[in-house]
Image: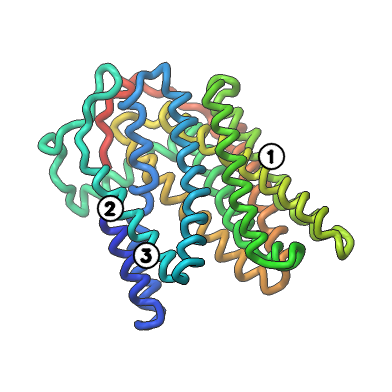
Amino acid sequence: MLGLYALGTALIAVGLGRVPFVAVLAVAAATGLAAPAVAGVWTSRLAGAVPAALLPRANSLDALTYSAAGLAGPAIAASAAWAVGPWGALAAAVLLIGAATPFAGERGRGGAKGGTTPLRSDLPPPPTPSRLAAELFDGLRAVAGRRPLARATAATTLSLAASGMVVVCWPLLGAELLGAPERGTLLLSVAAVSAIAANALLARRPSALAPDTLLWVCGAALCAVPLLAACARALPPGSATAAALVLGLAAAVAGAAEGPQLTALFAVRHRDAPAAVRARVFAIGAGLKVSGMAAGAAIAGALAERGTGAALAAAAGAEALAFAAFAALTLLHPDRPQPPEAAHNGQEFV
């Protein structure tokens, strides 16, 4: 999957401006098929790599790496673009994905008691299309059939759609209130640093809040992000400093909520996904989140033609809908008794 992701990114870079844009979009869509496996399946193996007592802290540290990558990636891209132009940023992306690929082939040296990473010869044969469809259905049934998984997936997917809208708004707000779009883009770094700090604190006290409680607390906090950004737009003209402070607060709240939200989501999946389909649950969830963020960005891009306020209003609505979905599934979806399983056996595959 990493190799396909690197190849697809390279083809996009080569094709831009040289082949019809529709062809580039088709390659981008095909490349995106690898994203869930790249983003989610490694995390699904965490339960088989650490003792159960350390899993909450490991979840926090694992989520922290996503935030750290979110901080480093734009910085590397910006540096490469400044040094050699936008093609340098694409080249850096391809090189980074390629550099990650060898780590995917390393064999495990053992993990938690009772579970190790199988050797290459122990892997099942490549699945047929019909088996892939059946396995996908099993994963979807596991997500839909268990209340904690269903509400966590629904709430975070909608929340990511709102985040995609807000990400589109940052450079627009930078141009509108701070004098340049790149100043708005810097707010992404503020959010990433805030997410890293929040997850670092959570790693020190992983049992401070239950994962389900953490999900709704973070969801409530994220509802405030587009509202704070809208407040910055309502300031009198010439209040650039005040606008920067309010936008910085909005970005900090976004990161402080998104980081622990991801940690809580990982914890719910490790706790409630059956071991036999855990990797599928993670991959399906990652695919839904990527799709949600992409859909949110597309909606915000269309609404931005009517003004940044319209995109921020849509983001606020999406966050409110995410919070409402979590509440509705809590009240209306009864728990179903689940058979006991041998957890943390480390035998999850896609």
Residue 314 point in image, percent of width and height: 68, 59
Q: Specify the amino acid type for callout 1.
A: Ala
Q: Which residue is mark 3?
A: 91
Q: Residue at left 68%, top 42%?
A: 253
Q: Specify the amino acid type for callout 3.
A: Ala
Residue 334 point in image, percent of width and height: 53, 29
Q: On the rendered structure, is 287 left or right of 346?
A: right
Q: Which residue is mark 1?
A: 221
Q: Residue at left 39%, top 59%?
A: 93
Q: Specify the amino acid type for callout 2.
A: Met
The answer to whether 34 is drawn above or below residue 22 in the figure is above
Label 3 to label 1: alpha-carbon separation: 37 Å
Q: Disc number at residue 1?
A: 2
Of the two numbered discs 3 and 2 on the same chain, state the one appearing first in sequence: 2
The one of 116 and 341 positioned closer to us in this rendering: 116
Q: Residue furthest right?
A: 236
